[in-house]
Image (spheres, rainbow, N blue to C red):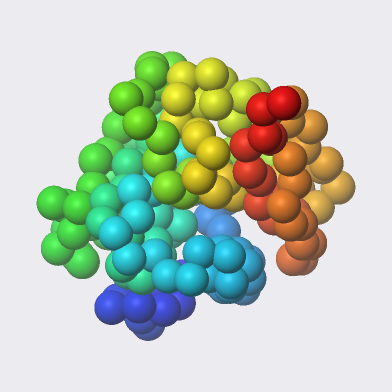
Amino acid sequence: MRIIAGQWRGRKLNAPAGDTTRPTSDRTRETLFSMLASRLGDFEGLKVADLFAGSGALGLEALSRGAAHCLFVEQDAAAIRAIRANLAAFRAQGQADVRASSVLSLGPVKEPLDLVLLDPPYGTGAGAVAVDKLVRLGWIGAGTWVSLETHADEVPQIKACEVESERKVGKARLTLLRLKAKD
């Protein structure tokens, strides 16, 4: 696994040993960030969260492309070590906050983020539950882009958001979401 674009382009990423995490493939990440770039323009100055972070590849890709800050949330100890090792290798500790906890245990925030990236375990429905909760807690606002990766056969049902775009890439389905407009 490598960073695809930006200041760290081509740099290798550490991934946690074992099979408790499923890193997003380079091809899937490339497709996702292409989808996002066509909507965002660039990533300069964005506040990002990489939830169910695994190796942190999604958040690190956003930082490499100019995001100002990324919150990484992961509960697997080996994955936390990989995220911290990647941040240290890129000297990006000052641009990141790493939380060793469940995404579902996050509390409310004062203002929404610009981009929320979720890559939960496939087949669990955890991503849809997390998105709905994050909306209620203020993480996701009218200007927030949400990316949810699921298995290609999963069709996420999220009450508070509407699908902006969807694409299947190998075994993955990438769904870009936006908060539904209030009537």
Where residue 44 appears, x then y in whole percent? Answer: 32, 65
- Which residue is depicted at the point 46% across and 49% down? 115
Seen from this angle, which residue lies furthest bottom? 10
Q: Nearer the viewer, residue 110 or 181?
A: 181
Is residue 79 in view?
Answer: no
- Which residue is depicted at the point 73% across and 40% down? 162
Where residue 47 appears, x then y in whole percent? Answer: 34, 48
Q: Nearer the viewer, residue 111 or 15?
A: 111
> Quarter of the image containing the C terminus?
top right
Q: How many marks?
A: 0
Q: Where 77 falls versus 37 (above or below)?
A: above
- Which residue is depicted at the point 80% across and 52% down? 152
Residue 119 figure quarter: top right
- Residue 143 shown left or right of residue 107 in the figure: right
Seen from this angle, which residue lies furthest front? 183
Q: Where 148 falls versus 46 (above or below)?
A: above
Is residue 28 in view?
Answer: yes
Where residue 32 appears, x then y in whole percent? Answer: 60, 64
Where residue 128 appears, x then y in whole percent? Answer: 68, 30
- Which residue is depicted at the point 54% across and 39% down? 142
Residue 28 figure quarter: bottom right
- Residue 145 shown left or right of residue 64 in the figure: right
Q: Where 136 falls versus 120 (above or below)?
A: above
Q: Nearer the viewer, residue 42 or 142?
A: 142
Seen from this angle, which residue lies furthest right? 153
